[in-house]
Image: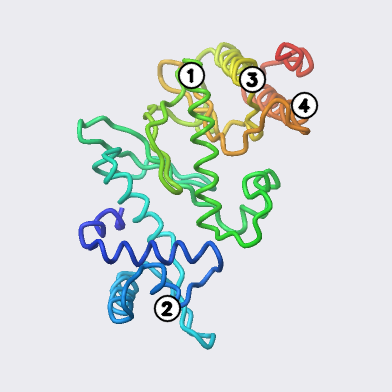
Amino acid sequence: MEVANLLTEMEKEDLRILMAIEIGMKRSEFVTINNIKFYSRYKIEETLFRLKKVHKLGLIIRDASKHQIAYTLNSKAYDLLALHTLVEKNIISQLGPLIGKGKESDVYSCMDDNENIYAAKFYRMGRTSFKSIKQLRDIIGKRGHTSWLYVNRLAAKKEYEALEEIYKLKLDTPKPIGYNRHIIIMSYLRGKELIYFKSIKRPLKIFNKILKQYREIYKKAHMIHGDLGEFNIVLDEQGNILIIDWVQWVSSDHPNANSLLERDIENICNYFQKKFSIESNVNEIISSFY
C-alpha cells in the first residue's frame, strides 16, 4: 500500500497540517488557508510550506474556485493519519497485502511488534453507497454538515463497539484489537465469504451453525445484524463460521428490530435453499430467537 511507505517521509509538521485540515472539515468540506493556519497554530510561512509539500505528495485536494484558496483531505491522507496513530499506539507496526475488497471496505493483513498477524479493515463508504443505505442515518444522527471521511470514522466506531460486545460471548468471532478513525484492527480468520464457495461439505451443518451463532448474539448481546447474507458470513476449511460486517447492527429494542431480524433469517434461508436445496421454515426459526 503506497500510503504506508509515505509514512516514513512525513515529518510531524506535515501530520499537524493534515490534522488541522481534518479539524476544519468538521465545519466545511474545504478548509481555507487562514483556518488551517489557525488550527495548526503555525505561522503563515510554515503553513504554506507544509501545504505545498503535502499537496505535492497527493494527500490533499485544492480548491481555487472561490475568493479564498481552500483544501480538503483525500482518502489517502485519512489512511495516513489513521495508520500513523495506530503505529504510534503500538497497535500495529507493518501493513501487509490486500486480502479482501468489498463494496464499502478494503481489508489488509497487518502485523504488530510481536509478529501477531491481524486484519486491518479500512472503511471506504462513498457518496453513492452511503445514500443507498438508509440505516446509516442512525450513524450520522442529526449532524448538519458531515464529511464522507467522518462517516467512515463513525461506521468504524459503530462496528468496533459491536465486535467488543460479540467477542465477550466466545463464539470464535474476531477479537477487536484497536481502531482509529476509519480503520479497525481485529484478529485474522483464514477463510472466505460463503458467496465464493461453489460447494461446501455438509451444508445443513453449516446452516445450523450460522443460525446458532446468530441466535446466541441476539439472545445474549441483544443485537441484530441488519444486513446478513452470503457476502458477510465467512467459512474456513475446518467448518468454522464467522458473521462479519456489523456496521448496520441495531439493538433488539429498535423500532424496526423484528422486520430486520426477519429479513436476515429469510436471506440465509433463501440462499441455502437455492444453493444447497436445504428446506427450512423461516417462521419457526424466527420464533426460536425469542
Q: Earlier in the sequence, mark 1 or mark 4?
A: 1
Q: Which residue is mark 1?
A: 168
Disc 3 versus disc 4: distance between alpha carbons? Answer: 12 Å
Question: Which mark, residue 33?
Answer: 2
Q: Earlier in the sequence, mark 2 or mark 4?
A: 2
Tag 3's secondary structure? helix
* 135 versus 272 height, above or below: below
The residue beneath circle 3 is 218
Residue position for label 4: 258
Disc 2 marks which amino acid? Ile
Q: Position of residue 232 (x, y in %)?
A: 55, 33
Q: 38 or 92, which lies in front?
A: 38
First reached walking from the N terminus: tag 2 or tag 3? 2
Residue at 50%, 51% in the rendered image: 124
Q: Which residue is at 23% across, 63% downward?
A: 11
Under mark 3, the amino acid is Tyr
Q: Nearer the viewer, mark 3 or mark 1?
A: 1
- Please state the horizontal and vertical placement of residue 33, each as a whole percent of the image: 42, 78
Residue type highlighted by circle 1? Lys
Q: Residue type at mark 4: give it.
A: Asn
Q: Secondary structure at mark 2?
A: helix
Instruction: Give whichever of discs 3 and 4 has the lower sequence position.
Output: 3
Q: Residues within 10 Å of mark 4 (few under 14, many from 20)?
A: some
Of the two numbered discs 1 and 2 in the rendering, the one whose residue sits closer to the viewer: 2
Mark 1 or mark 2, earlier in chain: 2
